[in-house]
Amino acid sequence: MSAKTVLPAVAMTAVSMVLTLAVVVMWLGTAVPWPVALVVGLGIDGGWLATLAYERRLAAQGDHNRVVTAVGWFFGLIASGVLVAHAVTADHSAGAWLAVAWLPIAAKALWLVHGLWERTALTPIALDAIQGIQQEARDEAAVARARLRAEATTEETRLAAVTQAGARVARVQAKTAATLAGAWSTLETARAGEDTGRALTSVTAPVTPGVTARWELPVWGPSEPTGRPALEAGPALTDAVLDALVDEIRNSQTPELSYREMAKRFRASGHSASEVRLRAAWNRVVA
């Protein structure tokens, strides 16, 4: 994977060194002997290459030296300066020479990018682990989104059902209220009719002479408790009286009556007693 950054840096470095050496030889060769110009060009490229090699060695050891880095950039600036000076003083093709004057700086920048790549590079195992974590996070996020959408849909369905049920209840209540109102109106009309009093009088006169009944409509809402009933229940029979009645009814026929027949005649004659007391009285009489 490092070839993606190291190959462009190597190619740019080679082009920059060849170009710098050629420019130095051509430019200074007119003023000094060409061997001298060659030595100068090799010195610039050699210094640039030596500092680069030392930086790469430090990077391989996980170290960094600012002085070496500064020296390397210094040699790169010298090479670019030579190219710029040659382009300015050239009689022809000045623009073309000036256009390639940035190559030494570009080569140095590519090596910087390659160094950053190496410092941040991870092993395939670490990359697989990171991808697994990211995939797990994406899966959890997708599941959470699906759960939220499902819950929202369920809540929406529930609210719709509740709303529909409420609407049905409201319609039933309205219909019932309308029916009650109609019935109440019918009752009120009947009570206010002219023949109502005569009809009630004809019905109640044989029972309560001299009393004219008045039909009142029932009241919606709390009602007052009624008074004591018109007919009060009689006092409970004592055991002695109950025994005497049971014995009398039992012996009123020959052969003697059974308990079931006795109980029927006892209650048919208008007497009242609980089943427990009546059974106890029977046992006392028979014993």
Image (cartoon, rainbow, N blue to C red):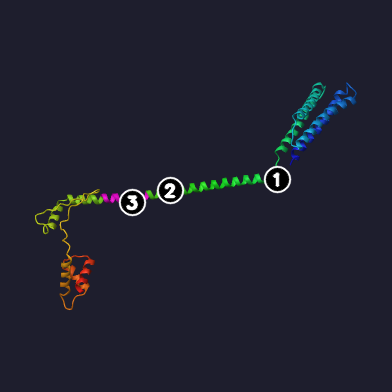
Snapshot quadrant of residue 112: top right
Percent coordinates x, y for residue 34 in the rendering? 90, 25
- Residue type at tag 3: Val
Q: Main secondary structure of the magenta part?
A: helix
Marks 3 and 2: in contact by CB < 8 Å? no
The tag earlier along the polypeptide, 2 or 3, is 2
Which of labels 2 and 1 is toward the front?
1
Give x and y (percent) for residue 21. Answer: 84, 28
| Residue at the image point whose x is 35% and y is 50% from the top | 169
205 sits left or right of 185 in the view: left
- Residue count near mark 2 (Cα–Cα under 10 Å), binned few <14, some 14–19, many ≥20: few
Query: Which residue carries the number 1 mark?
Result: 124
Cα–Cα gap, marks 2 and 1: 53 Å
Q: Quadrant of the C terminus?
A: bottom left
**x then y, percent, for residue 109:** 74, 31
Q: Is residue 126 visible?
A: yes
Identify which residue, 166 or 134, lies in the foreground.
134
